[in-house]
Image (spheres, rainbow, N blue to C red):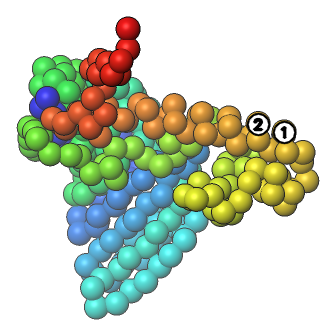
Amino acid sequence: MVLYEASLRVKHECPYREISERHPDLTIREWPLSDCQVLEITSEKTPTDRLLEDIDRLGTVLHESRDDAGYHVVTQSCLCSLEASIIDRFEAHNCLYQSPTIYRQGWEHYTVIAFDEADVRALLADLRADRDIELLSKTAIAEKRIPHSMLTPVDQLFDDLTDRQLAALQLALEQGYYEQPRKTSLREIAGRTSVAKSTYEEHLRKAENKLLTNAGRFLRLVTATSSTNPLGAGQSEPAEQGAD
């Protein structure tokens, strides 16, 4: 199977794109989370007062540094700049959005992966109907694995997990429950909490089920280009000797 990776840039109303247009030496990388965005902003030049004012309006500064390499800042923003509409269009044309979005010199840069080249063409035609767009590259990906880090934003893997389910999963990991051999039991882990073993186990199992269901959406991409079938899935088991 051949996959297609397409890189495109778009001009549309967006606060981060507008900041990159005002400051041409600036690069903004955006990682979307469930209710906010994390932005990495870099510049080779000393930041101007206007740039610092723009950054202050973006949200909470998590990290800031200035050295010979330039200016670097990480912020958490709730401007919700990543358009739901454009991501919805990616999904409508069976194209998987790859974060981060990059803003540079007044353009928004996106990367998507598709299973069919026709889906890429349809997506581009759809986007051109109401915004400026340029296709930068389209590459066939064959006979190699896609790095797992490309597949999905982390928050999508933990979609729909409650705080208690996340806490149960984290505690199980920290206590070595998933190591081989296991370093602890469900009863021992539950003993570290204020809930009964049955309650803790219910939270953990629901967390596992949701996590695997979410990861399953991206499993096809991980295995799509593999020509091997290590488990012989779909093949009939050999008959046991002496069987009737």
Q: Residues within 10 Å of mark 1 (few under 14, many from 20)?
A: few
Say left or right for 78 vs 231: right
Q: Residue at x 84, y 39 (%)?
A: 198
Q: Residue at x 84, y 60 (%)?
A: 192
- At label 2, the amino acid type is Glu
Q: Residue furthest bottom?
A: 68
- At label 1, the amino acid type is Ser
Say left or right for 79 vs 164: left
Q: Quadrant of residue 120?
A: top left
Q: Position of residue 89 (x, y in %)?
A: 33, 25
Question: How far is disc 1 from disc 2 in space, using C-alphas?
Answer: 6 Å
* Tag of residue 198: 1
Task: Please determine whether, in this image, residue 243 is positioned above or below residue 10.
Answer: above
Q: Is residue 11 visible?
A: no
Say left or right for 84 vs 114: right
Q: Residue furthest top?
A: 244
Q: Residues within 10 Å of mark 2 (few under 14, many from 20)?
A: some
Q: How many marks?
A: 2
Q: Position of residue 112 (x, y in %)?
A: 25, 38
Q: Which residue in the protein does label 2 denote?
A: 202
